[in-house]
Amino acid sequence: MSFGNELKAAREALPLSIQDVAGRIKIRGDYLRALEAEDLKVLPERTFTRAYLQTYARELGLDAAPLLRDFDRLMPQPQEQVNNLRKPGVQLDSARRGRNSTGLVGGLLGGLLLLGVAGYFGYSAYLSRSTGAASARQNPAALPSTRQVKFSLSSTPAGARVYIDNRYLGLTPVVSFPLDARAQAALRVEYGGRQSYQSGLNLEADRNLNISLTPLTAAQLAAQAQAVQAQAVQAQAVQAQATQATQAQAAQNGATASAPGTAAPTPPVPQSGTATSGAAAPASAPASGVRLTWAGQSWTRVTAAGGTVLYQGIPAAGSSRDFPAGITVRTGSAGLVTATPSGGQPQKLGAVGEVVTKNF
């Protein structure tokens, strides 16, 4: 590979533009472009061009020596200068010695000039790198961005939730979602009533996947319902303890009035999952947390802040459930679900048939 091709390949691999390098080493961009193209006719004198090549190579992290040898083959030093720098091997007359002395002085001056130019550009490159490094430390945004790949996924059925390393990407189909390239990632795809899909994923290149989600069996649905019910009971117990602690604190502060010598009655704790026949139960505000009320059957999933599923299923029309604050509610027909936060007003989650996800 010639020196021009090596320079270009090294620059593009970093990746840097001609303008980026020109700003760093203080050499005109058209000169750098000419070096890559090996277009020597637009470059200045050989001495300066050779110094530019050496500085450019070092800035790109290349060994300049083989590139300079390639340059010397393409643009050799003029023979007259070579002869002037050679020491005569025979006795010369005084006139000829004078001419050779003049040539020797000129060659030495040229060599000193070359050293000066190389030193100047080397020092400029050093200052540029030092300044660039300091700027990058002060401004992390100036550092090169991580390489990204495009991720696409479709599923059967469509509308499944897609997660990469627990980051929610959206519902399928996901098309050309930009992700940081990496060798290992965790893919999770979820859909109500279907088995979740989980797999390791290589993201070193663009990926386009198509998966089919298997329906849950009756036994799996029953086991899932039991697990959800157990989680709901646990959440209800935690809420009841919090309510009792609040009431006890209020009684201690004199906020609850009671007759002398008579213990203040403890109000009953609202029970989760209480169903009311007929129309939806009144969406009164709970003592704490959020109360969900269903006017009709709508698939609903409630998750805690840490991602724990507190409830998932299709409640009966007219039923209501209480949950702690900080939950995420996702439902398939938002117009049939009403949420009433503690101290707030009832609010429908959306329109009938609309799939909605909301945080409370």
Image (cartoon, grey):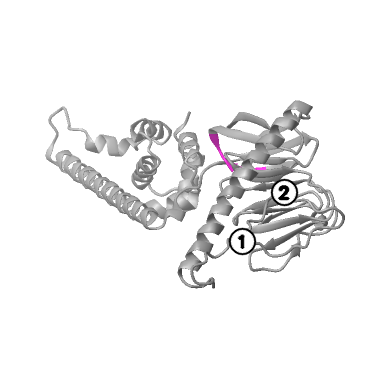
220 with respect to 81 (left or right) = right
What numbered label is drawn on residue 75? Answer: none
Dot 2: element: loop
Residue 181 is one of the magenta-drawn residues: yes
Q: Magenta segment range?
A: 177-182
Q: Quadrant of residue 197?
A: top right
Q: Quadrant of the C terminus?
A: bottom right
Q: Earlier in the sequence, mark 2 or mark 1?
A: 1
Where is residue 115? Give x, y as percent. 24, 45
Q: Residue at x 48, y 72 (%)?
A: 254
Asked if residue 150 can be seen in this view, the reply is no
Percent coordinates x, y for residue 139 in the rendering: 41, 57
Identified by mark 2, the residue type is: Gly
**How many neighbours does mark 1 have within 10 angstroms: few (below 14), some (14-19), or many (20 or more)?**
few
Q: Nearer the viewer, residue 266 or 66?
A: 266
Q: Is residue 316 above or below residue 249?
A: above
Q: Is residue 89 above or below residue 117?
A: above
- Residue 315 seen in the figure: yes
Contact? badges 2 and 1 (CB < 8 Å): no
Q: At label 1, which amino acid type do we have?
A: Pro
Q: Main secondary structure of the magenta part?
A: strand
The circle drawn on residue 267 is: 1
Quadrant housing residue 151 = top right
Which residue is pictured at 38% across the width and 45% down the height?
49
Q: x and y percent of residue 69 in the render?
A: 36, 31
Q: Which mark is residue 273?
A: 2
Residue placed furthest toward the right: 278
Location of residue 338 in the rendering, given as x and y in whole percent from the top left corner: 76, 59
Residue ID at (83%, 51%):
317
SS class of the residue under badge 1?
loop
